[in-house]
Every structure is written in C-alpha cells, then in structure tokens.
Image (spheres, rainbow, N blue to C red):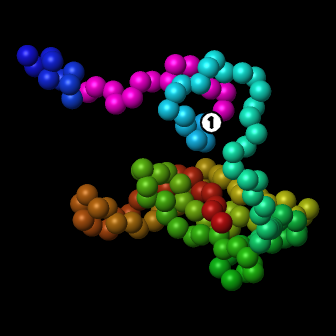
Amino acid sequence: DDDDDDKKKHRRRRKPTQSPTDWPTYEPSPIPTSSPTSVTPEPTHPERVYDLVFSDEFNAPHRTFEDGKDPRWTALEKNDYTNSAQHYYSQKNAYTDTEGNLVIKTEAADTEVVGFNDVNGKKEKVTKHFKTAML
C-alpha cells in the first residue's frame, strides 16, 4: 500500500519534547524535562570577556563619508540591483550634523543609472526612485 510506504519514509526518529522550555537547552538530555519553571538556570558555558577593538560614536560635527574623506568609514556610491530595489546609495546622503549625530538621509529622488540586466544580457538605463546611504 502506498500510504504505508509514505508513513515509513516520514517517521520521526525521536519523540518530540513533551513540553516547551523557557530557555535554550545547551546540552540536550535524552529524556524530556519536566514542565518549565520560571527560574532561569545558570549558564552552562563560561562567561566570555570581550575587548573593545573599535568604537565610533559619530560625535564629531560635519563629518562626510565620501571616499577618502573620513579615516574610518566610506559611504558607497552605488546602485542596489537586488530584489528589484528602487533605491540608490549616495555618498552625499551620509554625514554628521552640527552636533555630531550620524545622519543617513533617505529621500524620494530619481537617479538614472546604467546597470546590467542579467535576463536580457545587456546594459540598460534604469531609474531608481529613492536615494539613501550605506556606510
């Protein structure tokens, strides 16, 4: 019988856990745990200590991020062609304001670009209708 063959192919290898837990199980046990409690267990892995190796709070006023203008960041000047994206990344849309806050400006602005259409195998001119920035 075809139904019996399908059931054999799709059998579970293990029984599902009997009840959900409130926290991840780092070292699973072969036997399902009892019902969950409101107490969080101690971590099973030792606490990690990290060293800060880079930090930038963007707190200097009037920074710009065009290529070569900033010692740490570069804004991209590029078309986004993924998933039929309708935006263009412009270097001029990333800067810090007079108080040093990072601004990534997004605006409705048409930008014509030449891109490669991989379906037609040709370069073509397209219009992106939004402009933003990426660092």
> Residue 50: percent from the left, percent from the top?
77, 63
> Residue 9: percent from the left, percent from the top?
21, 29
Picture quarter with the C terminus: bottom right
Residue at horizontal 54%, vertical 25%?
A: 32
Badge 1, how many Cα within 10 Å: few under 14, some, many 20+?
few
Q: Nearer the viewer, residue 36 or 127?
A: 36
Q: Check disc 1 and report the residue beneath it.
A: 24
Magenta-drawn stretch contains 9: no
Q: Quadrant of residue 65?
A: bottom right
In this view, the residue farthest toward the left is 1
The answer to whether residue 34 is seen in the rendering is yes
In this view, the residue farthest toward the bottom is 68
What is the magenta range? 10-23
Please state which amino acid type lies under the numbered disc 1: Pro
Residue at horizontal 57%, vertical 52%?
A: 130
Residue at horizontal 66%, vertical 32%?
A: 23
Is 55 left or right of 94, judged from the image as shown?
right
The answer to whether residue 127 is seen in the rendering is no
Give the main secondary structure of the magenta stretch.
loop
Q: Nearer the viewer, residue 38 or 104?
A: 38
> Residue 94: percent from the left, percent from the top?
71, 64
